[in-house]
Image (cartoon, grey):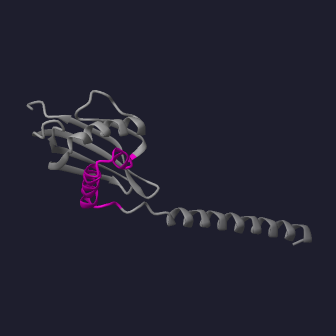
Amino acid sequence: MTRKNRIRAAIVTATALVTAATVTAGVSMAGGESAPKKPSKKEIAALFDGWNKSLQTGDPKKVADRYAKDAVLLPTVSNKVRTNRAGIVDYFHHFLENKPKGKKIQTIINVLDGNSAIDAGVYQFTLTDPKTGDKRVVKARYTYEYEKRGGVWKIVNHHSSAMPEG
């Protein structure tokens, strides 16, 4: 083998080794990235409890903090779709005047992956008329779509509609 052929063989071998090392490192890094652990249905159910507790503070901003910045709220007792924080705060400013206390009646939770889940079902709210003190119960169907953003679960879509039969 001539000197020129030895150099050429060394370059080809070195290139092959670098390529193999790069591919191996890439596969190893890709394999090391595991999907986030799926939360339990109980963990997702607890998100409603936290939201309900935020209602008890009477502070619409604390309730709105549970929603993502780009969340959509289709509320129970309003005809307006809320698509930003200001709209969500405004809705809860009025809703909280009724001192709502929520309770789930039926819940179906679907954990989609480690960062998203859907909680749908039926809940009821006991509302207190701020003028008379009279209480009334409103049953509604609901859907919460949750996403984990920056390590924190946020509501990205919340739909609630009063039951058709009252």
The magenta segment is 38-67
**Looking at the image, residue 108 lies above or below residue 1:** above
Q: Position of residue 82 (x, y in %)?
A: 36, 33
Name the residue at the left extreme.
165
Image-based side of 33 in relation to 118, left or right: right
Pick the residue in front: 148 or 126: 126
**Main secondary structure type of the part rendered in magenta:** helix
Total residue callouts: 0
Residue positioned 26% across, 42% down in the render: 96
Residue at the spot 75% in from the left edge and 68% down from the top edge: 13
Does 137 appear above or below 10? above
Taking 146 as reference, is 13 left or right?
right
Q: Which quadrant of the rendered structure holds the N terminus? A: bottom right
Residue extending farthest top:
79
Residue farthest to the right, as pictured: 3
Relative image position of residue 124 (x, y in whole percent)? 14, 44
**What's the residue at 13%, 34% (across, down)?**
163
Q: Quadrant of the C terminus?
A: top left
Please state if 102 lies on the left or on the right of 34 as rendered.
Answer: left
Given residues 78 and 141, the one toward you in this image is 78
Residue 71 belongs to magenta span: no
Which of the 4 image quadrants contains residue 3?
bottom right
* Residue 7 x/y as whole percent: 86, 69
Left-right relation of 3 to 35: right
Q: Residue at x 66, y 64 (%)?
A: 22
Give the image location of residue 28, x and y in percent. Answer: 55, 67
